[in-house]
Image (cartoon, rainbow, N blue to C red):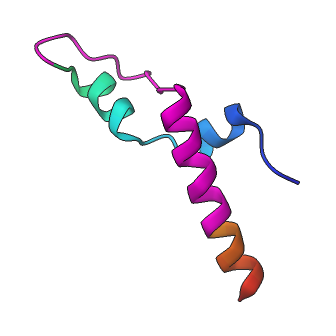
Amino acid sequence: MQPTDAELAVMFRWTLHTRWGVGGFMGSEGDPDFTCRCDSCTTSRRKRWAKESDTIDGA
C-alpha cells in the first residue's frame, strides 16, 4: 500500500524547497517547522519512496 502525501512529507521531509523555507530564502526569515508540499516536492518524495521500496522488496 502506498503512503499518503502527508505521510511522505513526514518520512522524506527534506527537499530543496523545504531547505529554503527553513533556512530563509533571499533574505526572508526561515521557519524551522516548514515542510514544502508543492507538487514538485510531492513528486520527488513519491519517486524516492518508490525507489527505496523497490530496493527493499527486491533485496
In the rendered structure, the answer to whether residue 47 lies left or right of residue 25 reads right
Quarter of the image for residue 23 reads: top left
Q: Nearer the viewer, residue 11 or 25?
A: 25
- Magenta highlight on residue 47: yes
Q: Which residues are magenta?
A: 26-51
Residue 4, percent from left and from top: 77, 38
Name the residue located 69 percent from the left edge and 31 percent from the top edge.
Answer: 6
Q: Is residue 45 above or below residue 54?
A: above
Number of numbered callouts drawn = 0
Residue 19, percent from left and from top: 31, 34
Residue 42, percent from left and from top: 58, 37
- Magenta highlight on residue 52: no
Q: Residue furthest bottom?
A: 59
Q: Residue furthest right?
A: 1
Q: Nearer the viewer, residue 54 or 10?
A: 54
In the rendered structure, the answer to whether residue 49 lies left or right of residue 14 reads right
Q: Is residue 46 above or below residue 26?
A: below
Name the residue located 77 percent from the left edge and 79 percent from the top edge.
Answer: 57
Q: Quadrant of the C terminus?
A: bottom right
Q: Is residue 38 above or below residue 9?
A: above
Q: Quadrant of the N terminus?
A: bottom right
Residue 40, percent from left and from top: 49, 35
In the rendered structure, the answer to whether residue 23 lies left or right of residue 12 reads left
In the rendered structure, the answer to whether residue 1 lies left or right of residue 43 reads right
Q: Residue furthest left?
A: 27
Name the residue located 43 percent from the left edge and 21 percent from the top edge.
Answer: 34
